[in-house]
Amino acid sequence: MPELPEVETMVRGIRPFVEGREILSVGRCRCAYRPILIEPSAAAITRRAKRCTIDSVRRIAKRVVLELSNGDAFAVEPRMTGLMLVTDPPDRTHLRYEWKLGPAATSRRNSTAGMSLYFWDRRGLGTIRLYRDGSIHQELGPPKLGLDALAVTAADWRAACDKTQRAIKVAMLDQKFIAGIGNLYASEILHLAGIHPESPARDLTDDAIAKMSAATTRVLETAIKYEGSTLGDGTYRNALNQDGGYQNEHRVYAREGELCPTCNSGLVERFVQTQRSTFFCPTCQRLGESCRVD
Ligand SMILES: [Zn+2]
C-alpha cells in the first residue's frame, strides 16, 4: 500500500495543478525523523531541476513520475505510507519534500499564484530519485520492471505465468512479473477470478488466465474510480487529503470470518504466504480447479 490504484489517483490528483508550472526550488522539508532516501544529492537535484517546467505527470508501476522540460524525471515511490499532496498535509511533522512551483503557463487552476507540491510520508520508507536525460526508461522498464498491470493482455499473463512455478499470489507481488499489484489487490483479483491463491502460476488453465486478466482490469479500474482504498490506519489520502472509497468494496481483503459476498455461502479465510496475509473464499476459489491436469 499504496498500490497501482492509489498511485494512479495521486497522479490524476496532482496533474491539473502542477503540469506546465516552473520549478522555483526543490528540497527536503524540516523533519525531525530519519531522512528518506533521495538521490542524487540536494545540490545536484537543484542544479538539474531548478527553472525546469513540469511537462507531464504520469505513473510507472507504483511510482509517481514528474517529467521535466530538460528530459530529466523525478520518480517518487510512496512505498508504505507516502502521499503526494497539493493541499495541507495530514500533519506537518511528516512532510519530507517540497517542490515550490511558479504560476501556471496555462489558465487552469490557481494559475496566477505559485504553489507547492509536497511528499508526505509517516513511516519514511518512500524514496525520491531524479533520473537524468531519459534514463528513467532504462531504469524503470523491462527487465527491471514487468509490464504494467493495466496494460497486460491475457497472452502477457500466460507468458509470465509459464516462466514460474511459484504460487500465483506470490508471483503477482513480484514487480518484475507484473508491475503495480500489491498484497491487497492481489487477493481481490484472485477472488474475482475464482482462482485459489496457492495455484502454481504455470499450471493455470487458459480459461483461468483469461478470467484473471479480466478481473485485474476490473478491480484496478474500479478502485481508481473510487480513488483507492483508505484502510483502518487512515494513512492513504488522495492529493487533496481526502479518503479513498474502495475499502467499502473489498470482497475478501481483511474480511476474515465474514460471509463471502460473491457466493453467500463460504466464509472468508486468511493465511500467510511469504510473510503476507492472503484472503480468499474456500467455496469460490478451490485449489486445483483452475489448474491443468497433466
Ligand atoms: Zn465465495
Image (tube, rainbow, N blue to C red):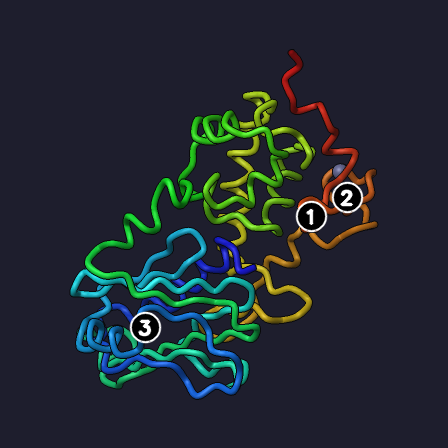
Of labels 1 and 3, earlier in sequence is 3
Q: Is residue 239 above or below residue 73?
A: below
* Whether label 2 touches label 1, CB < 8 Å: yes
Q: Give me the disc on residue 260.
A: 2
Asked which secondary structure carries label 1, the reply is loop
Give the number of the disc on residue 251: 1
Q: Which quadrant holds residue 47? A: bottom left
Ligand 1 occupies quarter: top right
Residue 143, percent across and down?
37, 40
Identify the residue at the far top of this view: 294
Q: Which residue is mark 3?
A: 17
Circle 3 crowding by C-alpha within 10 Å: few under 14, some 14–19, many from 20: some
Q: Which percent across, then down, holds residue 162? A: 51, 25
SS at mark 2 in the image:
loop
Q: Nearer the viewer, residue 111 or 88?
A: 88
Query: What is the x, y in percent for residue 54?
Result: 24, 68
Sequence-wise, the earlier of marks 2 and 1 is 1
